[in-house]
Image: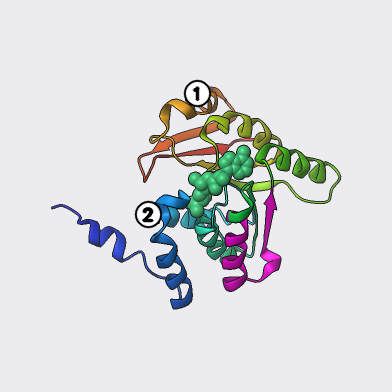
Amino acid sequence: MQLSQDVKTVNLKYFDEKTENILSELEKTKEQFWNLDRQSANFLNSLIKINNSKNVLEIGTSNGYSGIWILKALIETKGRLTTIEYWEKRQRIARSYFEALFDCDIVTPKIGSAIVVMEDLEKEIQNKKRELFDFVFIDANKKEYLDYFKLVDRILKPKGIILADNILSHYEKVLPYVNSLFENENYQSQILPLGAGMMLSYKEK
Ligand SMILES: C[S@@+](CC[C@H](N)C(=O)[O-])C[C@H]1O[C@@H](n2cnc3c(N)ncnc32)[C@H](O)[C@@H]1O
């Protein structure tokens, strides 16, 4: 028996009407804003809840589509999201959706280049102004994934999780990242054939 696409997607609508309306609206322009597909977003949301993650970093906010799914999970875990985007217009759009749906104290949108912002976050952590992250979602410039990882590794807790998107759709560009994670003995990694291909990595210690 084959599982139809309808069954796979229709039953994934389970948020309140206001959230669903905004998500449906955003899904109309998902190619323009390079958003996750609904199944990958649903997986991301579940994973945060399963792991009881409370301090999430997203690299690549775009217009906030995946951020909404992350924040929906964080309401349940009582956590917070920090999300990075260097395109001001996109960040502005994302902020407007976050403000429409969530308390502003659970989300911190950061404007700027991911590497620079993460270097600042690392300094804040060193100065005890913020805690290490327990979950990082990587979804920005595919050629920079390995550079992101070098910083993410310094600001991620032991037993933390990294989820990276576009692993199969942009395989050649992300190959240095993929190889580096598979070679790293402190990480247990797996590529999942979900949406554009996601790589799940668990930091041992
Ligand atoms: C694939 S989209 C993110 C989609 C979003 N996660 C979602 O599913 O709704 C990638 C975003 O990362 C941003 N970006 C790319 N390189 C970046 C960098 N070096 N620093 C910050 N943002 C970056 C792009 O402007 C783009 O909006």
Residue situated in front as seen by the camera: 59 or 183: 59
Residue situated in front as seen by the camera: 151 or 28: 28
Image height of 104 relative to 198, above or below: below
Q: Distance between the residues labelled 2 and 1?
A: 26 Å
Residue situated in front as seen by the camera: 134 or 36: 36
Q: Which amino acid does label 2 sit on?
A: Gln
Image height of 59 relative to 76, above or below: above
Specify the quadrant of the image occupied by residue 157. top right
Q: What residue type is labelled 1?
A: Asn
Q: Where is residue 135 in the image (x, y as percent from the top left)?
A: 60, 48
How many marks do you count on the picture? 2
User: Which is more N-terminal, label 1 or label 2?
Assistant: 2
According to the picture, the residue beneath numbered tag 1 turns out to be: 179
Find numbered disc 2 in the image and state the secondary structure of the residue it sits on.
helix
Q: Quadrant of ligand 1?
A: top right
Q: Residue at x 47, y 57 (%)?
A: 46
According to the picture, the residue beneath numbered tag 2 turns out to be: 39
**The residue positioned farthest toward the front in the image shown:** 89
Q: Which residue is drawn at 39% across and 53% down?
A: 37
For residue 17, side relative to residue 87 (left or right): left
Q: Position of residue 56 (x, y in %)?
A: 63, 52
Q: Would residue 146 be seen by someone viewing this image from the given angle?
A: yes
